[in-house]
Structures are given as structure tokens and as C-alpha cells.
């Protein structure tokens, strides 16, 4: 049992995933098995400035994290053998709701796309085995099956208590969004995708105009050649390049200013 601070690129061998299950009457369900999640202090209710990585539990105990804001020692626990819920002391987080990992969304896509989603998700399903699939594989298979291109640059909030979701979860929700299904009314888009020339003809550029987008993403830095018409030679503006790179970097940690490697010492097994 233990908790680590999640390091993008270094912890990818422990991806968020779901387990697929089909009952004897052919009804399918999926249960999240989550490794990467934000932590909210059960006492001061602030979000800690990293995602955390679930590395296993013993008797449902995952680990303790000291809140950097109020000093409270947060006890993190799960239940049974699947991490479909996590507890910060008594506060329960249900990942089917927070991460929108529920078979109802596959059914909703199937309704629009003539069964295309469940067909590719259940392609390798075998009754005699545990059927796990990573969230990214789920996203990739369905996006291909319904011919939707994703940007990977959109961010969503599904619960106001958690302002940041892991990158793979944002990609999953972007898929639900571009597929055009009805999302729960509490879901908010916090960053719209930059439209790059390579995205022309994709679902994103169909309903976004560059003008409104650029107003939302002012360039953060000034460079001597910022007035150049086409500095990178691909026909796009300089602002597009800046905004693209800026939006990638802040995906990884909740705030770069808050990032402090010394926090690793806060974790106790
Ligand atoms: Zn606290």
C-alpha cells in the first residue's frame, strides 16, 4: 500500500482503467479502477497541488497525506479490490460520477452511431477472464470507430470540488463532448481546444471560430518576432503556437507555482 505524487511520463505503467462486465442477459457495465486522482483535504476542503498515484492498499488503507494548507493528516482509503471509489477520511469520491466512467455514456454514443462504440469496446471481451481496458484505450477505440479527432487540449470540470482532472480523463470527456451526447448538466468546459490547421475538418473546428478562441487565450509571453506573419511556416499565427505550448504545460500539475518536490516528504506509507 502506498501513495505517490503522480509524475507525468514517469507513472504511465499504472494507467486509469475500467473493468468491463457482461451479465447472463447480455447487459454490459463498466467499473472504474482508478490510479490517478486529485486529493481534497477533508478538513479545510482545499485541493492539494498534485495528482496522486494509488499504488495499492491493505485492508482498504491506501496511505496518509498531510495537508500543506492546514496540516491535517488526511487518511486515504478505498474499498474492496477495485478503486471505483476513494475516501479522504469520511468524504467519498465516486469515480463513475467524477470521471464520467459509466456504461450509460457508451450506450448514448451507440444510440447516435448505430452501436459503433460497444462493438469496439467489447471486441476482445471474454467471459472467462477479467476484462480490463485503460481509459485511453477506451477513448482511442471509440474515437476511431466514430471518426472523431480529438485535440487532447480540452479540460472539463464535472464537480466544482475538483477543478482539475487527469489528462486521460479530460481526453475521455472530450470524446463524449465531440460525440455530441448529452452530458450531465454540472459538466463545465474550462479550456476550449486551440484550432490548429491540422484540425480543419475535425469535429472541433466545425463549431469553433478562431476569433472567439483567441480572445480566451491571450499570449502569455512576448517575443521579438511576434509580429511575424508566419514564423513557423505552417500558415498559423504565432499566438497559436504560444497558446498550444502553454496549454500543454499546465496539463500536468495543478499549478506550476505550487509545485514543490519537497512535498514528496509529506507522504507516509
Ligand atoms: Zn487542509
Image (tube, grey):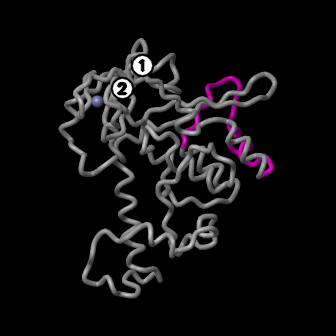
Q: Quadrant of residue 262?
A: top left
Query: Observer-nearest residue: 142 or 155?
Result: 155
Query: Which mark, by number, is residue 223?
Result: none
Residue nearest the viewer, comparing 182 with 231: 182
Per the image, label 2 sits on a secondary structure element best described as loop
Farthest residue to the top: give it: 59
Identify the residue position indicated by label 1 in the image: 90
Tag shown at residue 42 = 2
Identity of the residue drawn at 36% across and 49% down: 252
Which residue corresponds to the image point at 46% horizontal and 38% vertical from the top-left? 15
Marks 2/1 in contact by CB < 8 Å: the verdict is yes
Q: Does the magenta stretch include residue 119?
A: yes
Give residue 9's position: percent from left, percent from top.
36, 47
For the point 25% across and 23% down, the residue is: 268
Across and down, in percent, residue 195 comes to 52, 70
Classify mark 2: residues with Cα within 10 Å, few (<14), some (14-19) or many (20+): some
Which residue sits at x=42%, y=38%? Answer: 13
- Judged left or right of residue 5, residue 90 is right
* Range shown magenta: 113-135
With respect to residue 176, does 71 lie above or below? above
Which comes sooner in the sequence, label 2 or label 1? 2
**Image location (x, y in percent) of residue 16:** 49, 37
**Residue 189 position within the rendered picture, expressed as x and y whole percent measured from the top left:** 52, 53
Amino acid at each position: 500500500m502506498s501513495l505517490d505524487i503522480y509524475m507525468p511520463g514517469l507513472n504511465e505503467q499504472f494507467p486509469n482503467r475500467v473493468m468491463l462486465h457482461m451479465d447472463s442477459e447480455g447487459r454490459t457495465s463498466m467499473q472504474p479502477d482508478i490510479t490517478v486522482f486529485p486529493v481534497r483535504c477533508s478538513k479545510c476542503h482545499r485541493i492539494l497541488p498534485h495528482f496522486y498515484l494509488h499504488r495499492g492498499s491493505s485492508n482498504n488503507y491506501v496511505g496518509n497525506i498531510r495537508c500543506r494548507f492546514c496540516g491535517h493528516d488526511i487518511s486515504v482509503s478505498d474499498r474492496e479490490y477495485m478503486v471505483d471509489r476513494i475516501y479522504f477520511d469520511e468524504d467519498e469520491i465516486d469515480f463513475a460520477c467524477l470521471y464520467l466512467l459509466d456504461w450509460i455514456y457508451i450506450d448514448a454514443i451507440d444510440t447516435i452511431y448505430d452501436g459503433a462504440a460497444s462493438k469496439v469496446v467489447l471486441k476482445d471481451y471474454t467471459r472467462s477472464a477479467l476484462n480490463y481496458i485503460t481509459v485511453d484505450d477506451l477513448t482511442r477505440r471509440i474515437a476511431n470507430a466514430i471518426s472523431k479527432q480529438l485535440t487532447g487540449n480540452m479540460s472539463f470540470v464535472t464537480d466544482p470540488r475538483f477543478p482539475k482532472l487527469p489528462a486521460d480523463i479530460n481526453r475521455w470527456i472530450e470524446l463524449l463532448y465531440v460525440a455530441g451526447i448529452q452530458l450531465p448538466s454540472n459538466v463545465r468546459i474550462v479550456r476550449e481546444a486551440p484550432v490548429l490547421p491540422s484540425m480543419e475538418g475535425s469535429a472541433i473546428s466545425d463549431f469553433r471560430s478562431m476569433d472567439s478562441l483567441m480572445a480566451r487565450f491571450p499570449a502569455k509571453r512576448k517575443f521579438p518576432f511576434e509580429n511575424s506573419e508566419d514564423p513557423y511556416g505552417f500558415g498559423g499565427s504565432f499566438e497559436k503556437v504560444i497558446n498550444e505550448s502553454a496549454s500543454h504545460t499546465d496539463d500536468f500539475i495543478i499549478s506550476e507555482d505550487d509545485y514543490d518536490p519537497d512535498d514528496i516528504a509529506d507522504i507516509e506509507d
